[in-house]
Amino acid sequence: KVLLEVRDLHATVDGTEILKGVDFTVKSGEIHAIMGLNGSGKSTFAKVLAGHPAYEMTQGTVRLDGQDLSSLAPEERARAGVFLAFQYPIEIPGVANDQFLRLAYNTVQAQHGKEELDPLEFDDFVREKMKQLEMKPDFLDRSVNEGFSGGEKKRNEILQMALLEPRLAILDETDSGLDIDALKIVANGVNRLANKDNAIVLVTHYQRLLDYIVPDYVHVMEAGRIIKTSGKELALALETHGYDWLHSEAGRAL
Ligand code: ADP
Ligand code: MG
Ligand code: MG
């Protein structure tokens, strides 16, 4: 069953066209990786899907479960089940992380007509989730993302994802790279979330993460388009040969 269908997507930021006709289809139960050189438009694509206000969709269609997403605000897309772990998550000084997570969780619960959790119930729930994810609960009572290291921000995003159980999770890896512990947390979170009814899109500059998460499809983005789609072996080929190789005869043949 098709979950996300993107057709001929064009998008601009500050009047500059960055996405130049992206076609991309994701079915329920699939894990997709989007790779590509720095500046190819991967983060832009992720942000456009999430409805980031700085980006304007100028052409094409984006549908989730057949529903046109283009006119929906970011929070409405979130309600429809789209989760984007932001590349540079916001800091919210003065708001404790556990309060923030509980608010996010209860908002989604309420939308689905389910019971909300009080602070004590939520504390038990979130600590159990963190145990499953092999996360230390040390950052729960700090302000949201304030002074978090890259690895802590990433763990926090994965925790949010695990709590919210989105239909479509889009994870944009920072190009600066994560340490091996953070990579394993991400991989563990993704592998636990993945089931036959949802889908995951991993945006990643490096192949490393794909040592721990096996994607069904690997796509390469270049100059605002997806220029190649293949299986997981494509990531390994890129690791060995680099991106230029895709334009060689052997690369085109893969
Ligand atoms: P990636 O995530 O693949 O590294 P990005 O989506 O971040 O690529 O960027 C794609 C292109 O868009 C780059 O050339 C970048 O310089 C450009 N870009 C990103 N943000 C802006 C902006 N606010 N204004 C103008 N150009 C931008
Ligand atoms: Mg970049
Ligand atoms: Mg990026």
Image (tube, helix red, strand yellow):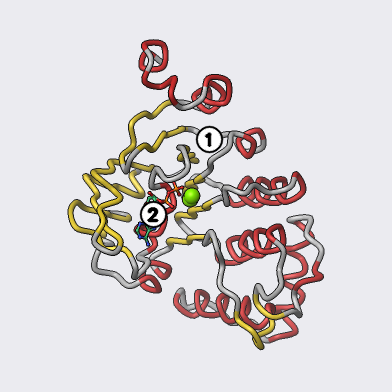
Left/right of residue 123 with respect to residue 206 in the rendered view: right
Whether residue 3 sits left or right of residue 148 in the image: it is left
The answer to the question of whether label 1 and label 2 lie on touching residues, with beta carbons closer than 8 A, is no
Q: Which residue is mark 2?
A: 44
For the point 31% across and 63% down, the residue is 55
Q: Mark 2 vs ligand 1: CB under 8 Å? A: yes
From the image, tell me which residue sits under label 1: 215
Residue 75 x, y percent position in the rendering: 40, 74
Depth check, front residue: 38 or 64? 38
Q: Is residue 9 above or below residue 237?
A: below
Residue displayed at 45% across by 40% down: 34
Instruction: Label 2: state its secondary structure.
Output: helix
At label 2, which amino acid type do we have? Thr
Residue 60 location in percent, x, y? 19, 51
Q: Amino acid at mark 1?
A: Pro
Residue 155 is labelled as none
Q: Nearer the viewer, residue 30 or 24?
A: 24
